[in-house]
Image (spheres, grey):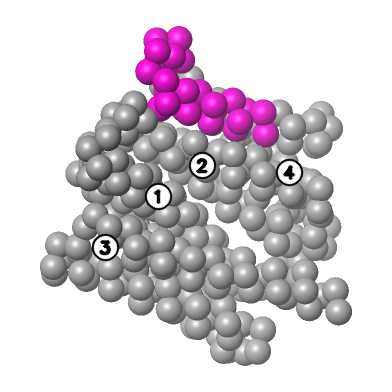
Amino acid sequence: MNNTLIAILAILSYLASGLIIGLRLFGNHFELRLPRLGGITLGLAGVALHSVVLYHTLFTDNGLNLGIFNATSLAAWIVVLALMLSAISKPVENLGIVLLPLAAIALILELTFPTTYIFDPTASWGLRIHAIISLMAYSLFTMAAVQAGLLAIQDRHLHNKHPGGFVRALPPLQTMEVLLFEMIIIGFILLSIGLLSGFMFLENMFAQHLAHKTILSIASWLVFGTLLWGRFRFGWRGRTAIRWTLSGFVVLMLAYFGSKAVVELVLAGN
């Protein structure tokens, strides 16, 4: 089957899954017609189709193509896969109202603006593990950032005493916070391993083309580390946790995708 057609089917599956989740959240009268499992199933179907697209775009005769839009698409695939698998046992599928459309957009960008950045085929296994773990960390923190956004909306509605249908459809505030910190803890562990492996297997983490990425990644690690320390030492929660989570996420995204955008789209064009 044509790769473009498979990508279109993946995009439609993601959007349909997001639509079902959105209708369940914003309109309770749809709940009987649109079972929770329907959104998860369509999301997993999108993941399966997306994996076929990634196979054809990432793996080339010259090596692994991790151009910025390919890498964005891969990160989106990891995010949605983790989300859908987690949703089987935990009430996290609500994150799909943001993450599923973003995954669809990532696929569209990958097809519309093909980029090339060949990962060194002679790279050591340690460097390959570093790249994979770093992408997994970015993906977990993306989920955490969306969770923090939903938590902020929920917190505002509850403080204003206007718990509308959307807020009532979300899990309790305490459950939402527990899920948020579970994502942050796992993401922090992966980011720590990613940084450690980078220092072990890269010749110079502070080389000119890596300096900004390294410094921003360490800054993000410090932000999330401070948040976890504040959580366990002082019981930080609510708006404090939301602000720290979103701040750390922005810094981390600038570290990876901001650096790739500058190197591949700005400097490469000069």
Q: Are marks 2 and 4 in contact (CB under 8 Å)?
A: no
Circle 4/circle 1 CB separation < 8 Å: no
Which residues are the magenta region?
Answer: 11-34
Marked residue nearer the N-terminal end (2 or 4): 2
Mark 4: few, some, or many residues within 10 Å (few <14, many ≥20)?
A: some
Which badge, 2 or 1, is on the more N-terminal residue? 2
Residue 90 image position (x, y, % from top left): 32, 35
Q: CA distance from mark 2 to mark 4?
A: 16 Å
Horizontal relation, residue 260 to residue 87: left or right: right
Please tell me in which quadrant of the rendered image residue 14 appears.
top right
Task: Calculate the distance from the C-alpha at mark 2 to the C-alpha at mark 1.
Answer: 10 Å
Q: Nearer the viewer, residue 31 or 200?
A: 31
Asked whether disc 2 touches disc 1, contact meaning CB atoms under 8 Å apart, the reply is yes
Mark 4 sits on what residue?
108
Lower position in the chain sequence, tag 3 or tag 4: 4
* Circle 3 residues within 10 Å: few <14, some 14–19, many ≥20: few
Q: Which label lies toward us, 3 or 4?
A: 3
| Residue 25 visible in the snapshot | yes
- Please name the residue that numbered disc 2 is placed on: 98
- Helix, strand or loop at label 1? It is helix
Q: Report x, y in % for residue 75.
A: 58, 53
Looking at the rendering, in which quadrant would you find the C terminus?
bottom right
Q: Is residue 25 shown in magenta?
A: yes
Q: Which residue occupies 70% across, 74% down? A: 262
Instruction: Indicate the amino acid at tag 1.
Output: Gly
Asked if residue 228 lies left or right of residue 115, the reply is left
